[in-house]
Image (cartoon, helix red, strand yellow):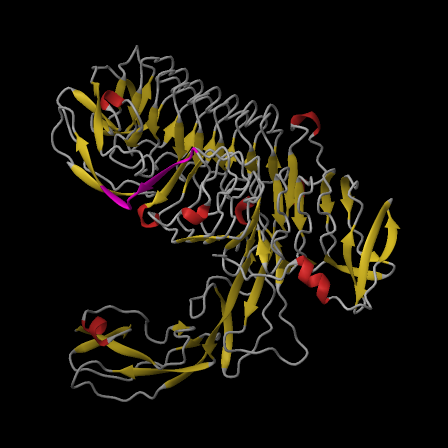
Amino acid sequence: MNKCISILASAALAALLLPFSLLAATETVNGIEWKYFVDNGEATVVEVPETTSGAITIPSALRGYPVTVIGAAFAHCSGLTSVTIPDTVTYIGTDAFSGSGITSVAIPASVTVIKERAFWNCSNLMSMYVDPENPVYDSRNGCNAIIRSDDNTLEAGCKNTIIPDSVTCIGYSAFWGCSGLASMTIPDSVTSMGDSAFSWCTGLTSVTIPDSVTSIGDWTFYRCDSLKKLYLPSHFEGLISSLIIPNGCEVVFYRSTYTVTLDRQGGSGGSAFVTATHGAAMPGIAIPTRTGYVFGGYYTEANGAGTQYYTTSGTSVRNWNGTTGARTLYAKWEKLEPINLSYRISNGKVTILPCEGCGNVVTIPSSIEGCPVTSIGNDAFKYCSDLTSVTIPGSVTSIGNGAFEFCSGLTSVRIPDSVTSIGDSAFAYCWDLTSVTIPGSVTSIGNYAFCGSSGLTSVTIGNGVASIGGYAFMNCSGLTSVTIPNSVTSIGDGVFYGCSGLTTLTIPPGVTSLGVVFYGCSGLKTVRLPDRFKGKTWGPYIPSDCQIVFYSTDYKVTFAANGGKLPKGKKMAAQTMTYGKAAKLRKNVFTRSGYVFIGWATKKGGAVVYANGQSVKNLAQAGGTATLYAVWAKKTYKVAFYGTYKGVTGKMADEKFTYGKAKRLTANKFKRKGYVFKGWAKSKALAKKGKVAYKNKQKVKNLVTNGKTVKLYAVWKKK
């Protein structure tokens, strides 16, 4: 038997260990009869009527005793929809909510123990959230799961869980009874899976266990009755009897690496084969060439059929799936149709103008008449329905309004990281476009930019984009996932209007301007919003069964003395800041004998990054902690003077300086026959090259922070 967590005592055993003096008491609060025990002045809730239904709040105290423990009180309360847990609770026991009807749960910061099976068989559960201040558990990245922070074990999940790529273990019975779980992507950070991890997940049809997993517990897929295919790394061959795989499920074992042949289909040059690793991105390749044709990528079938694995530039489209059986990829070629580009040159820069018809493949040159192409102008390729592929050079910085609007045949486009703006309706109604990556160089996405591109299934928005214009992804009904980066501060009205395929959405903490973005998102089940939007009325603009989870945008800044100490009676408390808002750092109160405080570093031993009391912003993610380290400079240091060359006469004593105070260098007293003194260099070698750093008697300050003697060398010029 394998478990990722310590095996905890069962509820039955715990009950046997209770002292006989602990007799159950009851109190009715808000119409619910609460049965509880009292021990050491604290209450343990052990039972409510199974008929308890709807949204309820657990009282923070019963007859004056603070409620600190939740026993198996809500097991089988099928009518229950949500429970508010007070911040007096520190312990959630085995089977606490097992088999209940809850749809959402929020774990307060006070809870430090969650026993196994606490959320077992909660088939309606859609949203799981942990307060960012919780020291033991978290729900990082809006993952809809409970993760033990110290060892990255996913303790409990639900049907909307997305396993973060930092999780290393899926715990005992983590998804037991999640009948609504239809699919699950297990990241390759996971190395072990506990007993019964997916037992009774009757909606699962296919699961791929990544090659990183070396240990799988017993009964993992027990009663996963819809499971038809299970992909396992080859190192599990002969070792799967304990998984209890349902009848009719095909088990496919795959190797870690494969040699994949690249069939150039009439082309020449480029890579002939690659070594692919299952579950990892394909390695980069050199692309082939073919006279009169443009390379269109590599696919699992000839003529661009099947699954695409390489782009036109030879970069990976997807991770290699070694279970497909395909060991050869085939080049796709598009016949090059000559086109005449219209353009305008202004101030030495080229803008592409609307063209009269175009072929199916367009490669925009990086320069025309010796001038860089920097802009694809408004409506440049509008209504070019035959266009299937376009190559945009790295010289382009802007894509104009309607540039590719109604290019209904466009299947692929790579936006280079030179582009800083995408205009209104730039890619609107590109129905065959399936995915797009917007680089972090782009700062704004225009209104209606991808409106009506119903073939889009995924959008990657780079960290750097600050604003997403109104209706940017309106009616992208095929869109199933989108990650909005923390750089975004403004999201316009109707951005995801009619995106019926979206099920979860997280609005990042830096967003301060948020339009009505959810209207028509009929498939939306969970939305995570910064708590600054609490109180805003969403009314009919969000599905009635969608769970809205508000999360704190606060983070902490702590201060480390880094060799210093606090004076008696002084404090240097942690500072709470809000993501997206600038605030001034606390003034330093640490002291260090013989040193002067000069600022804060972001790592121990690092250089000064922030001044004392400086206004700062976004030092950590929402719910995170940033630690700043005091940087100290020796209070006093010496400056020593050297004549540089033999034969120089005169003497100069060392000069003492105090850090933080400006002072003039001692006037030069050295003499060299036939030469004139020009100033001081920072090294002997620089002095001989005539590199003057300081003039004679120049006022200087803070030449060194470590207290070491500064050596200055005389610079001479022949008379």
Query: Magenta: predominant secondary structure element?
Result: strand
Where residue 681 appears, as percent x and y from the top left, is: 27, 73
Q: Is residue 567 left or right of residue 609?
A: right
Answer whether residue 717 is visible to the viewer in this image. yes
Image quarter where the C terminus lies is: bottom left
| Residue at 20 percent of width and 25 percent of height | 369
Where residue 713 appears, as percent x and y from the top left, is: 26, 78
Q: Is residue 263 left or right of residue 123?
A: left
Q: Above or below — where is 4 with respect to 603? A: above
Residue projecting furthest to the top: 356
Which residue is nearer to you in this view: 370 or 602? 602
Quadrant location of residue 254? top left
Where residue 182 appears, as percent x and y from the top left, is: 51, 34
Residue range of the region highlighted in magenta in the rendering = 248-258
Q: Above or below — where is 475 with respect to 419? A: above
Quadrant location of residue 273? top left
Which residue is nearer to you in this view: 410 or 659? 410
Which residue is nearer to you in this view: 577 or 315? 315
Residue 40 counted in the magenta span: no
Residue 256 counted in the magenta span: yes
Where residue 454 appears, as percent x and y from the top left, is: 46, 20
Which residue is nearer to you in this view: 225 or 5? 225
| Residue at 55 percent of width and 40 percent of height | 200
Quadrant location of residue 545? top right
